[in-house]
């Protein structure tokens, strides 16, 4: 080679397309340029290499010995380049799906289930962004946002997943040990308490529940307080530390797995429901659309499974009461 410098990459690409297709015209279509431009690039490459790559025959051409050798090398080289580019784009796409949600929802509902989605969609990476009282405007580059909204709220454009209701839950061992069969039996057992804000409203508390049952306030000496950490209260109930008045949605996996039982059909409505909101251009990303569809189906299934799993402990009359929140 008369010149040790690497020839024009554009010229190399043009020649590789010509040699592979066996036609200037086909190469020009592949590279979206004119046949004349392809011919000039090939001649430029021959001049730079100081060798003949093509032997012109009538209106066509054949590859010279040097031309065949360069073709084989370029085919291998460009294949590696295309493979590397595809892999890079795939990795960028894998990191695009970010889900934002409340910390308790992430811990008790999303995290225990997300592997089910990854098993059927192994090429997708998921990043979960969670914190207490998450606000959509505080988070950049999110693909799906799951949060609680008032039933009559129309601020976000998204699908409603289902209402958030509070119910009394306990481990089967705890329920059997304390022989809890009616609401009045709750008065004499340790209670796990939370203090949760839903927007400008307080979530229903034990005091609200006892009021609805027309029962006196419980003894506070044996209770455990968890503040806003409802996921810890649910875990404590599953461990047998006491009864918890908690979200039926957040406790759904523990109910299905038999760690918790729903004691009564009485529920306290919060007047809030879960909403899943995608970014505006989510339809352009099939993976985000697939994840959204899966989340919606999984949510519906998890809620319906609750009622089946703990049907044996529905001892009170079928009633649902509002907290007035």
Image: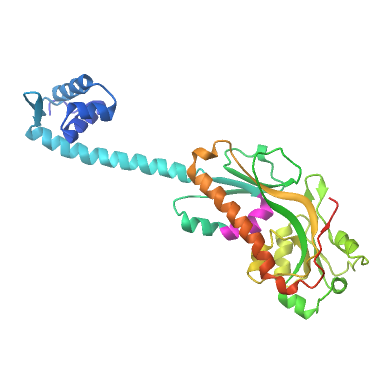
Which of the 4 image quarters holds residue 49? top left
Q: Is residue 147 above or below residue 35?
A: below
Colouring rule applied to residues: rainbow
The spot of residue 294 in percent (x, y) is: 55, 53
Q: Is residue 69 among what the camera can see? A: yes
Residue under the image location 72 percent in, 50 percent down: 273
Question: Which residue is at the front of the view, 294 or 219?
Answer: 294
- Is 19 included in the stretch rendered in magenta? no
The spot of residue 91 in percent (x, y) is: 43, 44
Question: Which residue is at the front of the view, 157 or 260?
Answer: 157
Which of the 4 image quarters holds residue 169? bottom right
324 horizontally vs 30: left or right: right
Q: How many marks?
A: 0
245 horizontally vs 142: left or right: right
Residue under the image location 49 percent in, 50 percent down: 125
Q: Is residue 24 above or below residue 95?
A: above
The spot of residue 147 in percent (x, y) is: 68, 47
Q: Is residue 276 above or below residue 5?
A: below
Q: Which residues are magenta?
A: 102-113
Q: Is residue 51 among what the camera can see? A: no
The spot of residue 164 in percent (x, y) is: 73, 54
Predominant SS of the magenta segment: helix
- Is 111 included in the stretch rendered in magenta? yes
């Amino acid at each position: 080679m008369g010149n040790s410098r690497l020839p024009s990459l554009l010229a190399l690409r043009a020649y590789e397309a010509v040699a592979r297709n066996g036609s200037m015209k086909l190469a020009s279509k592949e590279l979206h340029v004119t046949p004349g431009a392809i011919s000039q690039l090939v001649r430029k490459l021959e001049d730079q290499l100081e060798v003949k790559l093509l032997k012109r025959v009538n209106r066509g051409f054949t590859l010279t010995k040097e031309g065949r050798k360069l073709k084989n090398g370029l085919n291998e080289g460009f294949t590696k380049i295309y493979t590397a580019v595809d892999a890079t784009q795939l990795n960028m796409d894998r990191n695009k799906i970010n889900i934002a949600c409340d910390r308790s929802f992430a811990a008790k509902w999303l995290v225990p289930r997300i592997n089910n989605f990854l098993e059927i969609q192994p090429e997708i990476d998921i990043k979960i962004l969670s914190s207490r009282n998450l606000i959509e405007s505080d988070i950049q580059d999110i693909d799906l946002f799951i949060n609680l909204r008032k039933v009559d709220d129309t601020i976000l454009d998204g699908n409603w997943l289902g209402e958030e209701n509070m119910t009394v839950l306990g481990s089967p061992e705890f329920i059997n040990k304390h022989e809890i069969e009616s609401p009045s039996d709750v008065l004499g057992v340790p209670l796990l308490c939370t203090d949760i804000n839903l927007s400008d409203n307080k979530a229903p508390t034990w005091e609200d529940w006892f009021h609805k049952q027309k029962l006196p306030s419980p003894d506070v000496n044996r209770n455990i307080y968890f503040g806003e950490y409802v996921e810890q209260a649910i875990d404590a109930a599953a461990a047998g530390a006491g009864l918890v008045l908690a979200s039926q949605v957040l406790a759904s996996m523990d109910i299905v797995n038999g760690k918790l039982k729903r004691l009564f059909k009485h529920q306290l409505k919060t007047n809030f429901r879960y909403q899943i909101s995608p970014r505006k251009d989510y339809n352009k990303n099939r993976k985000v659309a697939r994840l959204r569809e899966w989340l919606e189906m999984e949510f519906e299934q998890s809620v319906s499974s609750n009622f089946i799993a703990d049907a044996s402990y529905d001892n009170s009359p079928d009633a649902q009461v509002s907290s007035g929140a």
